[in-house]
Image (spheres, rainbow, N blue to C red):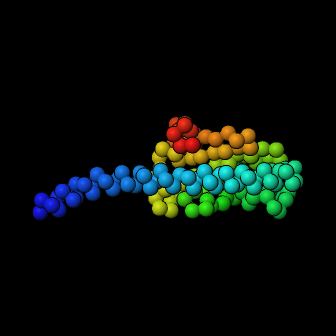
Amino acid sequence: MIAVAIVAILAAIAYPSYRRSVIKSRRADAKVALSQTAQQFERCYSEYGTYDPSSASSCPPVTTSGSITSPEGYYSVTATALTDTTYKLKATPTTKGGQDEDSECAVYTLDQTGNKTASTAPSGGTDTTSTCW
């Protein structure tokens, strides 16, 4: 019975630490999705002179009203600002694998100048850029 109690205590301590590590490792999926989408926008701009995907069929399918899913499916990427000469991409966690429990790096953003930010909440929580990127 003592052995069972010891195992239960160790599991109670180890499992939350394991979950934090898994969530932290999945943050790379947001970075990959934002980088790939930004590269697509830059190719679009080079070819058509615009970031606006509605004016060219080879531009990324990211709009202010639509989104794409990251390669592993842990993040959803949308464009929060999109004009002919600017874009701002936002990656937010999905419920897959409990990634939406990530309260430290809840939102990643990347714009056309390469400016990267991260925050704890979608509506401008605490700035965690130095920790998350």
**Residue at image x 74%, y 46%?**
87
Residue 93 picture location, percent across and down: 54, 54
Quadrant of the image containing the N terminus? bottom left
The residue closer to the viewer here, 105 or 21, is: 21
Q: Is residue 63 among what the camera can see?
A: no
State which quadrant residue 124 falls in: top right
For the view shown, which residue lies furthest in the left direction? 1
State left or right for residue 53 relative to residue 79.
right
Residue 117: image location, x then y, percent: 61, 40
Q: Quadrant of residue 122?
A: top right
Q: Is residue 37 left or right of residue 120?
A: right
Residue 12 shows up from this direction = yes
Residue sitting farthest toward the right: 48
Q: Is residue 37 above or below residue 87?
A: below
Quadrant in which the C terminus is drawn:
top right
Task: Name the one closer to the observer, 40 or 79.
Answer: 40
Residue visible at 49% across and 56% down in the picture: 99
The number of callouts visible is 0
| Residue drawn at (21%, 59%) of the image | 7
Image spot of residue 28 (x, y percent): 56, 52
> Would you place residue 42 above or below residue 3 in this image?
above
Question: Could you say which is closer to the camera, residue 87 or residue 24?
Answer: 24
Across and down, in percent, residue 44 comes to: 81, 54
